[in-house]
């Protein structure tokens, strides 16, 4: 049994609604018209209902292997908790992670390191995407034990501010204004805790809405072509969501030749930089997220509340309160470039302390050299001829930045990154002449991954 108690200033009530297809069809059509066509063909009965649940920003939809749902007492609780409605238990207990369609805003799938000192973002699921599809698939019956779990947050959990927000007196003003319990952040991994508290102590009704399929939807109906198509649709969603692991297999098969080439060139193998190459390739294939500046649509979080808090209460003076969010580089997305920072490693493997390297400049030079060798090696492979696919070598570009001048001319200055990013470039217009923080830690050894 588990409960999340939320101290919310906003006067909206946590709870859930059970709805029929005709009640939600128009809203689903706005975010996923293909799914609507399939369900219409299925012709669901009145027993095929949905549970509409609302989650405040930053709350856990899933944590430590347990899903949470709104209760009538104003908390979020696991299905086995005594506060949970018996009817809700009966409708959603068919899976440890029931099928949920994101109806409004987004969710983030992430993992925390065993010591919870850092988080690893994997997926951002926006409006119209279904999660929980993995649990419907058949997997090998023998599995490894693990000391981590997939967690799901309402809105983007992996948010951080580019400029430093570690000034003690300024943070104390936030603590008084918003009744914060969080201390001054040690690293940008700690920013999300503060952002969440600021939002919860503000007058906002921002929430992620999830439409959960009830157990009736999972009952086999092989005589109904619409139901078969629905099952196939969920299988395709699961396949798309597991592409990270599928691409890792391909990458690992190429890796042996890459290591052999480095050995032939007598290049010292650095495990951290090699793991970073794999991470950059995974970001370039669109299977995991990099980071980009937030825009003003507030899909991932109520960012204007956070920005205003740091302008009006914290009193940021020199730089804009520019927040970064996780996002994908995908052909059908408006996002054409994301960033990865050596200062903010999101590797599944634990990174070493950066102080063990002579300098970040030297490290990013080495990273560029290794990636150039890897791409040169792949240039010798057969090009991708499938018309539905983009060739990685032809369409993905890597640029390397540091906020110090590179005397060798290999690494570009951060100022060029800001000029070339429309959101960062617009900071002085958005934030009363405050520019993006060119000298921030995140850009001190940063890679831009762009789709061309």
Image: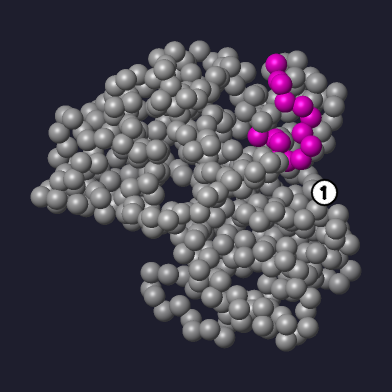
* Residue drawn where x is 31% and y is 36% of the image: 94
Question: Residue at label 1?
Answer: 439
* Residue drawn where x is 62% and y is 18% of the image: 201
Picture coordinates of residue 79 (x, y %)? 40, 26
Is residue 429 in view from this perspective? no
Q: Nearer the viewer, residue 131 or 40?
A: 131
State the extent of the magenta-drawn residues as a range: 179-192
Is residue 397 in view from this perspective? yes
Q: Secondary structure at mark 1?
A: loop
Picture coordinates of residue 12 (x, y %)? 47, 15
Q: Residues within 10 Å of mark 1 (few under 14, many from 20)?
A: some
Asked if the magenta segment contains residue 189, the reply would be yes
* Residue drawn where x is 53% and y is 84% of the image: 381
Q: Quadrant of residue 402?
A: bottom right
* Residue drawn where x is 44% and y is 18% of the image: 14
Picture coordinates of residue 159 (x, y %)? 64, 39
Our reading of the magenta stretch's main secondary structure is loop
Query: Is 242 located above or below residue 24 in the figure?
Result: below
């Amino acid at each position: 049994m588990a409960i999340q108690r939320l101290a919310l200033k906003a006067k909206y009530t946590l709870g859930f609604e059970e709805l029929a297809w005709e009640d939600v069809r128009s809203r689903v059509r706005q975010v996923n018209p293909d799914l609507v066509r399939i369900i219409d063909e299925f012709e669901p009965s009145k027993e095929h209902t949905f549970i509409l649940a609302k989650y405040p920003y930053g709350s856990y939809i899933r944590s430590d292997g347990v899903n949470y749902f709104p209760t009538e007492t104003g908390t979020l609780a696991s299905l086995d908790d005594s506060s949970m409605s018996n009817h809700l238990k009966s409708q959603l207990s068919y899976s440890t992670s029931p099928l949920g369609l994101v109806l409004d805003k987004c969710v983030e799938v992430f993992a925390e390191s065993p010591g919870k000192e850092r988080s690893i973002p994997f997926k951002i699921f926006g409006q119209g995407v279904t999660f929980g599809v993995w649990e419907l698939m058949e997997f090998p019956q023998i599995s490894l034990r693990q000391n981590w779990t997939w967690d799901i947050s309402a809105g983007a959990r992996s948010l951080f501010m580019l400029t430093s927000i570690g000034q003690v007196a300024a943070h104390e003003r936030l603590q008084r204004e918003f009744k914060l319990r969080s201390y001054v952040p040690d690293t940008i991994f700690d920013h999300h805790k503060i952002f969440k508290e600021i939002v919860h102590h503000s007058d906002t009704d921002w929430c992620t809405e999830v439409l959960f399929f009830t157990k009736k939807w999972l009952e086999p109906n092989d005589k109904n072509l619409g139901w078969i198509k629905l099952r196939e649709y969920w299988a395709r969603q699961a396949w798309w969501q597991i592409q990270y692991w599928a691409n890792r297999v391909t990458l690992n098969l190429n890796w042996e030749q890459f290591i052999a080439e480095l050995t032939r060139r007598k290049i010292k193998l650095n495990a951290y930089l090699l793991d970073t190459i794999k991470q950059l390739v995974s970001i370039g294939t669109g299977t995991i997220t990099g980071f980009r500046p937030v825009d003003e649509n507030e899909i991932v979080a109520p960012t204007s509340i956070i920005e205003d808090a740091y302008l009006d209460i914290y009193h940021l003076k020199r730089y804009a309160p520019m927040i970064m969010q996780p996002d994908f580089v995908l052909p059908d997305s408006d996002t054409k470039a994301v960033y990865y920072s050596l200062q903010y490693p999101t590797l599944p493997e634990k990174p070493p302390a950066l102080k063990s390297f002579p300098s970040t400049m030297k490290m990013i030079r080495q990273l560029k050299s290794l990636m150039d060798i890897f791409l040169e090696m792949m240039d010798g492979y057969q090009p991708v001829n499938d018309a539905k696919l983009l060739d990685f070598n032809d369409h993905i570009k890597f640029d390397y930045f540091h906020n110090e001048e590179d005397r060798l001319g290999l690494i570009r200055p951060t100022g060029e990154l800001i000029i070339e990013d429309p959101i960062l470039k617009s900071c002085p217009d958005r934030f009363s002449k405050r520019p993006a923080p060119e000298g921030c830690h995140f850009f001190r050894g940063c890679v831009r991954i762009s789709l061309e």
